[in-house]
Image (spheres, helix red, strand yellow):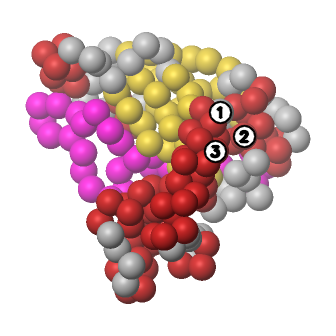
Amino acid sequence: MLRHEDLYSLEQYARERPAFRARVMAHKKVRLVELGKHASLHFEDALTMQYQVQEMLRLERIFEPELIQEELDVYNPLIPDGLNWKATFMVEYPDVEERKRQLARLIGIETAVWVQVADFARVKPIANEDLDRQTEDKTSAVHFLRFELTPEMAAAAKAGAAIRMGIDHPNYQADLTLAPVVRDALAADLA
């Protein structure tokens, strides 16, 4: 979990931001899993959440300790705890009209995403713990997912086992094995 002491002051962040941002963007690249042309998982960790908090503090000019703590309280739950992965799941269609049509066809897609370590059972996510992100007419383009692993799955992933991810929705399917660099980045999140 991030603490106030882990953050740059606004003045420090103004100086460090270009280098810090470049480091975070490179870090995020190996934590991105594209599931076909229109869906992706952006796996979060302490560094990606520190960036989110720092940017929020910068934009809002927040420097009061209690308000900084409020931001930490919002973002800390998105950091994995050693036996799970937490990801922002995005459904992306550049054309607005096509996006509306597809989001109507993809209701429930957030619970159709899965991860699999080695030959263990597929793990479906716990989706949108913060709030419901779909209506009767459409799903949201952004969802927050948590994949809970068993200790055995975590140990296998850390030992180098293959990790697969996919989507099994009637209107959208994907299935892929993670590249070693992505697999290693996600395995590092596990205890």
Q: Which residues are magenta?
A: 125-154
Q: Of the numbered discs in the image, which one, if any, rests on residue 75?
A: none
Residue 167 at x, y percent in the picture = 47, 24
Residue 57 percent location from the top left of the image? 38, 66
Foreground residue among 17 and 143: 17
Q: Badge 2 local density, few (<14 within 10 Å), some, or many (20+)?
A: some
Q: Residue at x 70, y 51 (%)?
A: 189
Q: Quadrant of residue 70?
A: bottom left
Q: Which residue is mark 3?
A: 23
Task: Kindly give the residue lying farthest to the right in the view shown.
Answer: 159
Residue 30 is labelled as: 1
Mark 2–mark 1 contact, CB under 8 Å?
yes
Q: Is residue 149 within the magenta segment?
A: yes
Q: Secondary structure at mark 1?
A: loop
Eyeballing the image, is 139 above or below 52? above
Marks 2 and 3, Cα distance to the nearest angstrom?
14 Å
Distance between mark 2 and mark 1 Cα atoms:
7 Å
Up-down: is 154 above or below 75?
above
Quarter of the image for residue 23 reads top right
Q: Which-is-in-front pick, marks 2 and 3?
A: 3
| Residue drawn at x 69%, y 31% as measured from the top left | 182
Mark 3, secondary structure of its residue:
helix
Viewer can see residue 135: yes
Number of labels in the image equals 3
- Magenta stretch contains residue 70: no
Q: Residue at x 75, y 43 (%)?
A: 187
- Circle 1 or circle 3, nearest the eye: 3
Q: Amino acid at mark 1?
A: Val
Residue type at tag 2: Ala
